[in-house]
Image: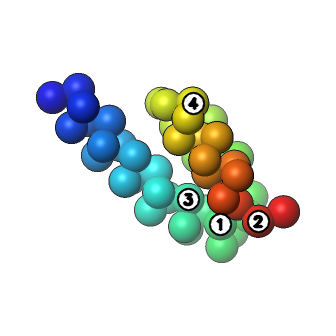
Amino acid sequence: VVRLDGVASATNIESASWTSASTGTNSSYYVEMSPSPPVSAVLLASLPR
């Protein structure tokens, strides 16, 4: 169940990152809210600078 939860949260964060990427300001907020550090690191790396 924990693994399924992690996958589900990862997909939610990915979809949120797409919306935040268009805004640009909410990107850092989603990264802070992300439960897993690796996922946030990937989002930071994927976000354009």
Q: How crowded is mark 1: few (under 14 residues within 10 Å), some or many (20 or more)?
A: some
The Cα atoms of the two marked residues, 3 and 1, are separated by 6 Å
The Cα atoms of the two marked residues, 4 and 2, are separated by 19 Å
Q: Along the horizontal axis of the image, is 12 left or right of 43?
A: left
The Cα atoms of the two marked residues, 4 and 1, are separated by 18 Å
Q: Mark 3 points at which residue?
A: 17
Count of marks, rendered view: 4
- Sequence-first tag of 3 and 4: 3
Residue 26 in view in this figure: no
- Residue at image position (55%, 59%) is 17
Q: Which of 44 and 19 is in front in this view?
A: 44
Q: What element carries label 3?
A: helix
The Cα atoms of the two marked residues, 2 and 3, are separated by 12 Å
Query: Where does the C terminus fall, quadrant-wise?
Result: bottom right
Position of residue 21 measured from the top left corner of the image (x, y, whole percent) = 65, 66
Q: Are marks 3 and 1 in contact (CB under 8 Å)?
A: yes
Q: What element carries label 1?
A: helix
Query: Where does the N terminus fall, quadrant-wise?
Result: top left
Q: Name the residue under label 4.
A: 37
Of tags 3 and 4, the one toward the viewer is 4
Residue 21: mark in rendering: 1
- Disc 4 marks a residue whose amino acid type is Pro
Q: Is mark 4 on a helix, strand or loop?
A: helix
Residue 48: mark in rendering: 2
- Disc 2 marks a residue whose amino acid type is Pro
The Cα atoms of the two marked residues, 3 and 4, are separated by 14 Å
In the displayed structure, would residue 23 be above or below residue 9? below
Of tags 2 and 3, the one toward the viewer is 2
